[in-house]
Amino acid sequence: MTAQELREKYIEFFKTKGHVQIQGRSLIPDNDPTVLFTTAGMHPLVPYLLGEAHPAGKRLVNYQKCIRTGDIDSVGDAGHLTFFEMLGNWSLGDYFKEDAIEMSFEFLTSPQWLGIPLEKLGVTVFKGEGDIPRDDESASVWKRLGIPENRIAYLPREDNWWGPAGTTGPCGPDSEMFYYVGDAPCGPDCKPGCSCGKWLEIWNDVFMQYNKKADGSYEPLTRTCVDTGMGIERTVTILNGQKSVYDTEIFLPLRAAVERAASYRYGEDPEKDRSVRIICDHVRSSVFILGDPKAVSPSNLGAGYVLRRLIRRAVRHGRKLGMAGETFSSAAEVVIEQSGGPYPELLENRAYIIEELDKEERKFMETLKKGEHEFEKLLPNLLKDPRKIMPGRLAFKLYDTYGFPIELTEELAAENGMTVNRAEFDEAFKKHQELSRAGSEQVFKGGLQDHGDAATRYHTATHLLHKALRIVLGDHVAQKGSNINSERMRFDFSHSAPMSGAEIERVEGIVNEQIRRDLPVSMEVMSLDEAKAAGAIALFGEKYESQVKVYTIGNSPSDYFSKEVCGGPHVERTGALGTFAIQKEQSSSAGVRRIRAVLTGRGLR
Ligand code: SER
């Protein structure tokens, strides 16, 4: 059975049970600041689980794209994924335990639907804890349906309680359904959760009875609900008698694309196979994050940081396979083609997905080359330490000077039989943050070096800000004016809505990243048409001479961050700017926003 067939069957089954199909939502939750990604099908439904009436009624069904990064280090084994699809059915104050379990059982075992043999199934139910009693009701329904007592495991809260999706919200005891992936249970006491590890969870019925509040207390919900979630990838795996999600039709074309790009044949070397699987998972997640209507791009904050980490980790594993960079786009195309039916947003955002993926891959290859080279220079000395501990201050230096992520330093250290003194790294990191704050206070007290220099630095900062705004808010952003003095900059731009806190942070993050990269700023004189053809931003409505100056901030004419027609002057390298901070974002006039920002600290030079 294919993923598409499973999706269709599930939706059809629950329609026969009076459910209405609703659309899955964005991977970035709308109203939940406590998490970065949609982690389950119930997530977008939280307001309805808490009591609001849903326009589609009380019985709902859908498929939902989800990201969970908690287990990112286990990705690469047979079953863990960062991106997965979840099928779900919900009762909003309608049916409860008995009906929910009966429907799950029928869908799983009826030959008309999945037809899973009864002897392959086992379930878990909540054991009871504190004031909440054992869930005997669920257990007796399972038994009545034919699940023998020895296949019902009673497990504690850490196993059989679900939610909330973030830190607050609806939650309750659950009952999970498992498939035995061996030939037969390992012995008379073999139950789901058994140490033989052969039980694979495929579905979860959650009985929403409580709302967890911010103070950690649980209040009973006046209206009980059901939330269920079936993992598509895992279910397709067991239905086809396979052992790993990566062997299913969901992953095979993607895996083949990675194998082609790496000129490697899967199955030849277990370590390399693991790298292939990690690349498959991470590329697939990245495609879905980039292709989401909320258009996240790689950055140093929030969801953008997770995306960056996924791409960068894939690059690292690509290198283990001898891939030389810019090689993920063919794999990404496979994901877009394959999932474009159920997720048309991937087709709509194809160009953006590929461009951002390529860009991040290229950028990181550079960082890696530099960072690994430095690590290798340190290695002979590090290996002399009999305890095999890499000092945190050296790991920090790699981070601070080359942008080399601590996670990767830790991986490199591990590959060489060492650990990193993480506490020392964290301390150096904190101290650095405090120093830069102290530095900014100094600057405020003492004034900047001289007005001319300061203004020049702000001038370059406007170019970085302009580009960062276009990345975060979209290409409709155009500079409407700017005003610079030695102490601050003001920048007006077209955009109709106030920026959110997260957008402001992302813009700051992007600007500061370009500063940290210490990019060269170069100038060329050309005609306005040539400038436009080269991709330079020119200010709308400005009058230009026939020959204009184009300032490029970046490593080369093709690999740059910003290119703008401008009279200058500018600094030579972005490292001179120090730290960029947005102080205020407000309305300037209709459709125009105004940002006030400052540069603090002395920068690299
Ligand atoms: N929310 C539950 C889960 O994620 C059921 O969908 O397991």
Image: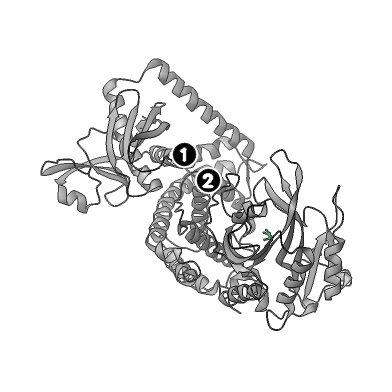
Q: Is residue 81 above or below residue 468?
A: below
Q: Residue extending furthest top?
A: 446
Ligand 1 position by quadrant: bottom right
Label 1 sits on a secondary structure element that is: helix
Question: Does residue 72 appear in the picture of this structure?
Answer: no
Gap in Å between the C-alphas at discs 1 and 2? 9 Å
Residue 126 in the image: x percent, y percent?
82, 58
* Secondary structure under the numbered disc 2 in the rendered image: helix
Q: Position of residue 471 (x, y in %)?
A: 38, 48
- On screen, residue 544 versus residue 428, left or right, reads left
- Left or right side of 90 for 435: left
In this rendered view, identify the residue nearer to me: 483 or 598. 483
> Which of the 4 quarters of the picture holds residue 507?
top left
Residue type highlighted by circle 2: Gly
Which residue is the site of mark 2? 302
**Image mark for residue 505:** 1
Specify the quadrant that holds the N terminus: bottom right
Residue 292 higher or lower than 384, as above or below? below
For the point 42% across and 66% down, the residue is 347
As shown in the figure, which amino acid type bears the numbered disc 1?
Answer: Glu
**Relative to residue 302, is residue 8 depicted above or below?**
below
Q: Earlier in the sequence, mark 1 or mark 2?
A: 2
User: Which class describes the residues within 10 Å of circle 1: few (<14), some (14-19), or many (20+)?
Assistant: some
Front one among 102 and 459:
102
- Residues at marks 1 and 2 touching, judged by CB atoms closer than 8 Å: yes
